[in-house]
Amino acid sequence: MDAHQTYPSESVGARAGTPVTVEKARPGQPHKGRVFVGVHAHLQDLPRYAGGLCAKLILEGYTGFLVRTTNDEKFGGRDIPQNILNNEQEHLKMASVLGFKDVFDLYYRAHRMNEISPTEIRGRLILLLRMLKADTVISFHPSGAGESELDHAATGRAVEDACDMAASESDFQEHLEAGFGPQSVVERYYFHTHPDQPFNRVVDIRPHIEKKIDAMIECRSQGGGASGAELRARLAREGKRLPLLGDDDRTANREYVRQFLLDEHRDYGRRHNLQYAEQFLYVDHRPPTKTKVEEYVARNAVGI
Amino acid sequence: MQRRRFLSRSAAAGVAAGFGATLKAASDAQSPSGPSSDLPSKFTPAAHSIPHSNYSPFTTPDYYTFADDLIIERNASNKPHQGKILAAIQAHSDDIPLFAAGTVAKLIDEGYTGYLIRLSNDEAAGSTLGHGVVQNDADIQEAAKAMGLKKAYSFYYRNHRMDDNAAIEIRARLIFLFRMLQVNTVFAMDPYDHYDENPDHIVAGKAVEGACWMAGGAKDYPEHYKAGLKPAHIREKYYHARSPQGHNLVNRVVDISSYIDQKVRTNMANRGKGPAGTAGARLRQQLARQGRKLPLLGNDDETANFAYVKHFLMDDFRILGRQFGLECAEAFRYIGPEPDYLGNIVKYAEEHSVPL
């Protein structure tokens, strides 16, 4: 199976003329030994925008780590302390479902990340990228058009800058002495969170849709993970039932997600004859096998 | 701190009035007089001025407030601090050398392993900013060696602009270093130093104070623990004031008589900044051009530099020491290990509990 197929772009959001690559399942474990770090702001972000991609990459050999930048205190309908606790616990469960090896919560206050120090969060992310030896990151677009969520914007910006500086021997030199050397993050997948944002990669997530759904239903305090059970309970109080929701809460939650929360993924897929897809702006920073200088020298060097 | 400005003024005065006038002023300054005061007797002074030699503004602060439990820390034998780690944190290359080098050298001699951490890039002292950065970067390595420290770190924040940096970021980096090095004891500018003109000093002191508090906590920067670092429990802090304006609470006076030569050599290492460095050689050369010499300065630059620092710049530390019956001293706001609060309660319970 050809893992990647590239098409001229006619899709909404893709820049005119920018080819869109369809990334499909790859057999075996081609990414064995490689590490990706998913960085999101809120519990529901990564499962919604990239849950399928993360499950795919882990199945294909990547080791995945998950970083949540906020404390999610505003989400869950409870008081702030209880929201923080609930989101923290659900985050661990969600990460486990997707197969992440470890989770890092930075706990910046939700909806207030525009007031934090960019250098401080960047420093923390640089340490994480170096410590985990990240080859790839999955996060928000650093300057995503139409992104009204300020925590998303702050997170994306910090991740982008951290990726650039993690490879430098001159930034945070104390990390090097602690044994965490420069780290080149060579591949980046930026979430597609708004129709105005560019994308150039469509990932076929059909083989991983059940895992994505499993992850999404762990997001109960936000993201609609418990909505199926809540709807089922409400209908029961009214003496009604919806066959779609089945006979238990887990089934109700899963089917609710499948029916109502995956429309965008069906839509992304339809354009490429896929059942479900996630969209990303993919940035490839892998060094070429030969630099332009090396190529020039190879072509033009003569004997002395 | 515009130390160069002071040196420039001194040099200008020397040129304008001749060195005879300059040296006479210095000679006059060698007999410090006690403080005179119009304070009515019904008031108890809340701050104490210390006589100064007036050879340099960057020695001992103008005022101290002495605590009633002040301790004189004397030499300790048999390496009582073996296995302990100290970090001497400074905003600028000359801060620790001027204000605390004697005590740092003493603790190293008594068993500590030590590290020097400079927060700024010292760009504001040099013929150009670039030259200033390079020279001071080299200087801190030499100063660290002179004090017996194992290594010098630098964060390179811009000199005189550290209040533009995120306090939390500086603090985070210090927490990382404290944990990585397993620091037990710190030296830094007093975070509550009064009347300090230099914004970098205040930022440095506050950052150190916060980092000391948080470096031992489990919940601050937990990713450090996943990286294999351990909590750092900073049990002792030596805070010094900046002169001349500085004024801090002093509860510890350290006898540095045995380490004064190390302090001198540490200051000699500061060629790019501060009143020491090569000032002795420059004075010797200037006098030679006038066909004169100062016997004190000897016959070579090294001797001149050493003698200049020891005679002129260490004098105020001798004056401070004399107030306490010591040959030389440095003064600190010292914060020591906390009592074993919980242990005390357990002990109380053991002693006072009765059968049910």
Image (spheres, coloured by chain):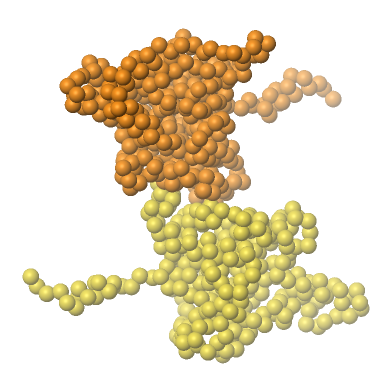
The residue at the point 71 percent across, 58 percent down is: A73
Q: Nearer the viewer, residue B175 or A136?
A: B175
Q: Colour of chain B?
A: orange
In this rendering, does residue B4 appear at all?
Answer: yes
* Horizontal arrangement in the rendering, residue A194 relative to residue A29 (left or right): right
Q: Nearer the viewer, residue B290 or B148?
A: B290
* Horizontal arrangement in the rendering, residue B41 relative to residue B353 (left or right): left
Q: Is residue A243 above or below residue A181?
A: below
Q: x, y (%) of residue B251?
A: 56, 20
Q: Is residue B225 above or below residue B288?
A: below
Q: Is residue A296 above or below residue B340?
A: below
Q: Is residue B292 above or below residue A1?
A: above
Q: Residue furthest front?
A: B16
What quarter of the picture does the N terminus of chain B occupy?
top left
Q: Colour of chain A?
A: yellow
* Horizontal arrangement in the rendering, residue A107 relative to residue A30 (left or right): right
Q: Residue furthest left?
A: A304
What quarter of the picture does the C terminus of chain B occupy?
top right
Q: x, y (%) of residue B238?
A: 51, 27
The residue at the point 37 percent across, 35 percent down is: B4
Q: x, y (%) of residue A150?
A: 63, 64
Tag count = 0
* Horizontal arrangement in the rendering, residue B308 relative to residue A205 (left or right): left
Q: Quadrant of residue A76?
A: bottom right
Q: x, y (%) of residue B9?
A: 36, 31
